[in-house]
Amino acid sequence: MMDVEIKGIGCTDAPGSPHLNKSFKDLLVEAVYKAISDAGIEPDDIDGASFSYGGESEVGYGSITPTLVDALGLSSIPAYINISNCASAHSALMQGYEMIQTGNYNCVIVAGFDKYTDVIPFENYMLLSTDSMFDYNLGFSHIDAFLFQNEYFRKYKISSNEAKESLLAFAKLARKNASKNTVASLYNIPIPSDKILEKLPFFGSTLQAGEGASAVVLTPASKKSNGRNRVTIAGTGFTTTSHYIAHRYEPGLLKQFDDNESGNISTGLPLKMAVDQAYEGANCKATDIDMIELYDQGINEFISLEASGICKPGTATRFILEGNGEVDGKCPINTDGGNIGRGHAAGGASLYQIIEIVKQMQRRSTGVQISKNLHWALSTVIGGAFATSIAVVLKNMDWGE
């Protein structure tokens, strides 16, 4: 397998806020040209593109890829589009990675964006269904998906007080990291008191929805030449399954989560399968991971930590309460603030995770900086209720230097 390097990174600030003065084209152009500049290449060097988006996909931009390459001044190049709910940007990253792996492309731009204020009803529509009106008419919604996750606390007999304290702790961790991160929507904003956070859904452990764009440049791995550590995609895992829990967890449909029972919504089984694939591809294991960027919203952070093997099933709440996710903890989590503090622009959200890992590995963070040298990092994201689950292991090729 060819080593694929993340050569350049770029994003717009405050993805958890509306950007009323910019169109989706403006946001995309800003992020992509930051990535091109960061990579030290010319636009003409790009020979392929993989895009992702959220809001605009619902309102008829069926042939949006020509619009995007034209807005970027990159036509004519082959360009593809990916729509996988909140996992859309990682779907685009998987495609860009595979484009380089074929040997047919030498420089691929991967970019995602979201601009729901262009279409006022979209935010409400997004909350109604996990994928389309087909889902909504069958009676399954985003809200249902998150409510089902309360099964996690019941399954592991976690007390209501521990559930509350761990959600509060994660909410404060996200805000603390975001307050230092110049890219984050909550940059320079003090952490609210517990009394205020307790009044919010999931005690403040909820994402900040907004608009923005993110981009990375992928190339075959190069020799070290610009003084930065080279960061490569070492392993990937990608699973898709039904949005509908009864379909997904019919006995025997998927392999068992453990010896005693098949998986359910509280185990994040599809994500575990994706992470296992990524570890195998990278030839590493959970104990090797030096940092993780994960999809945080409600109880997802606990389920994702356990599905990733960072901690054992039923122990993620204690993992957080003991400070293991802090910037200098056992495994730093979402050092950029994540969806909660950085913000969540659905079509490009997960690429912000990749960008943060690259910054940390190259020791050029725009917020808190992990002090130890980083060798391996993991990025995980879900679309819908773990219906699309993607894991990416990143490797610092110049670890220790």
Image (cartoon, rainbow, N blue to C red):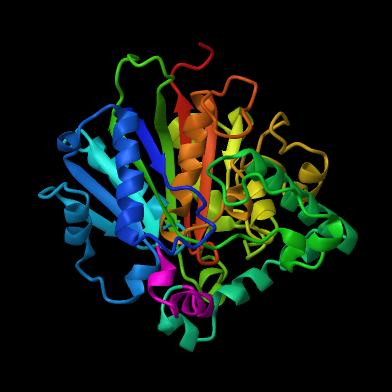
Q: Is residue 115 left or right of residue 62?
A: right
Quarter of image, res 146: bottom right
User: In percent of the image, x 14 and y 36: which residue is there?
Assistant: 44
Residue, far front = 21
Q: Looking at the picture, does residue 191 appear above or below residue 1?
A: below
Q: Is residue 233 left or right of residue 291?
A: left
Q: Nearer the viewer, residue 290 or 63?
A: 63
Q: Nearer the viewer, residue 17 or 145?
A: 17
Count of numbered labels shown in the rendering: 0
User: In percent of the image, x 51 and y 66: which residue is there?
Assistant: 384
Q: Is residue 75 left or right of residue 364?
A: left
Q: Residue 361, percent across and down?
A: 51, 26
Q: Residue 79, percent across and down?
A: 20, 52
Q: Looking at the picture, does residue 343 appear above or below residue 131?
A: above
Look at the image and give the residue range highlighted in magenta. Answer: 115-130
Q: Is residue 183 magenta?
A: no
Q: Residue 85, percent across and down?
A: 44, 64
Q: Looking at the picture, does residue 131 appear above or below residue 388?
A: below
Residue 157, can we see it? no
Quarter of image, res 269: bottom right
